[in-house]
Image (tube, grey):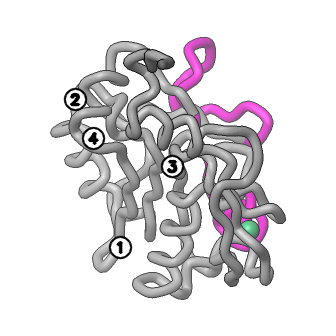
Amino acid sequence: MRILPATSSLFSRALRYLNRPGVIFRNRGICPTCENSVVFSARNAWFRDHYLCPCCGSKPRERALMRTLELFFPDWPSRILHESSPIKRGASIRLSRQCKHYVPSQLFSDIPLGAERNNVRCENLECLTFADESIDLHVTQDVMEHVLKPDQVFREIARTLKPGGRSCIHSTDRQQTQTITNTGPSR
Ligand SMILES: [Zn+2]
């Protein structure tokens, strides 16, 4: 008789199955980020980071962002759109290419707030240098869980939004927030 180790439980075997190399899930659809007809696939059970578009590399949150803009802010290409801490992939690339007044920002430690480096503006969400009521849409993806003073950030967003403006925020859940806040971004 073979004695099975504890890790050979049904649950563990299921986890090993889901984490094995190769595609574990796929489906065909239209990518809201690159607008191509593609087969989305995941090679890891952690869909948040591994369920990708093969064309633009977008993760689910980026596709959710673009779908949200499409539904609630469809004229975003002609508006003044500020994105804090964009990434060189998927939704950020599309926003930068199609929005006529796209303003990307990062918090650089060695240049003044409001200055630019390589067309990226230096901004601190807690004290934005944008004028009152000057922005149509603020976008953040996995940023809010890292800010130290969320109340101040939301005040600044409200101050700088034009009347009728919007803020589209994607953030991790509370449990992850508590873990990630002290360790810095992992994007
Ligand atoms: Zn895509």
Check disc 2 and report its element: helix, strand or loop.
loop
Q: Nearer the viewer, residue 111 or 8?
A: 8
Q: Residues within 10 Å of mark 2 (few under 14, many from 20)?
A: few
Task: Give the label, 3 or 4, closer to the camera.
Answer: 3
Image marks 2 and 1: residues in contact by CB distance under 8 Å = no
Q: How far, Cα to Cα, is label 2 from label 1?
A: 22 Å
Q: How far, Cα to Cα, is label 3 from label 4?
A: 26 Å
Q: Quadrant of ligand 1?
A: bottom right
The relative height of residue 152 versus residue 59 in the rendered view (above or below) is above
- Residue type pointed to by label 1: Gly
- Residue type pointed to by label 4: Val
- The quadrant of the image that shows the C terminus is top right
Q: Nearer the viewer, residue 171 or 41?
A: 41
Q: Residue at x 73, y 50 (%)?
A: 89
Mark 2 or mark 3: name the one nearer the start of the chain: 3
Quadrant position of residue 114: top right
Q: What residue does disc 4 label? A: 153
Q: How far, Cα to Cα, is label 4 from label 2?
A: 6 Å
Quadrant position of residue 9: top left
Task: Give the label, 2 or 1, closer to the camera.
Answer: 2
Q: Residue furthest left?
A: 151
Quadrant position of residue 166: bottom left
Q: How far, Cα to Cα, is label 2 from label 3?
A: 26 Å
Q: What residue does disc 2 label? A: 149
